[in-house]
Amino acid sequence: MTEDESVILSAFEPCSIRKKKDLLVSGKTCKYLYFITTGCLRSFYIDSKGTEHIYQIRMDNSWISDLESFFTQTPSKYNIEALEDTQMLRISFQRLEQLYGEVPKLERYFRILFQKAYINALKRLNANMWETAMDRYNDMLKEHPMMFQRVPLIYIASYLGITPESLSRIRRRG
């Protein structure tokens, strides 16, 4: 292991969360950026009618956070809940800023990571506006087949922006 790798690893602290527990609650500030080593989490908000809208579903070897709340250190609009028992590594905003100084190459890694997150959010927004539900479903099935084994269909429907009934119809046609 290189010196940079050991500095990076020591900056992250291991943590875990049990299935159905909240990692972040709307109205609280997101204090950490999380790397999921194993498990599954969802990020969602609840509208004024009480309907849940899923923004992210993340599984093994991926990142999750409310980046707006994390970077501005302001209250989050989102909740993050564990869909499975989940093992993670986390880093605080202050420690991440420190780490950029200690390992300059890491700043480039995170810049690219955050650019990709922004582009994925735009793609998702565009897909919801321009693609059919069937196309969004097929794209998800192709890109994330394991999600259908691990995530309840009601959450997949919410993520796709459709009702569970519509998802059932699409799956029957598929």
Image (spheres, grey):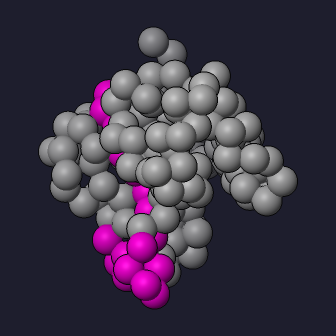
When the figure is inspected, residue 86 is found, relative to residue 32, above or below; the finding is above
In the picture, which quadrant includes the C terminus?
top right
Q: Quadrant of residue 27?
A: bottom left
In this rendered view, identify the residue nearer to me: 25 or 74: 25
When the figure is inspected, residue 85 is found, relative to residue 120, above or below; the finding is above
Residue 48 pos. (x, y %): 45, 87
80 horizontally vs 127: left or right: left
Q: Image point 28% across, 44% down: which residue?
A: 83
In the picture, which quadrant includes the N terminus?
top left
Q: Image point 75% across, 47% down: which residue?
A: 132
Q: Which residues are magenta?
A: 25-51
Q: Quadrant of residue 75?
A: bottom left
Q: Is residue 122 visible?
A: no
Q: Image point 38% across, 80% down: which residue?
A: 50
Farthest left residue in view: 18
In this rendered view, identify the residue nearer to me: 127 or 120: 127
In this rendered view, identify the residue nearer to me: 5 or 113: 113
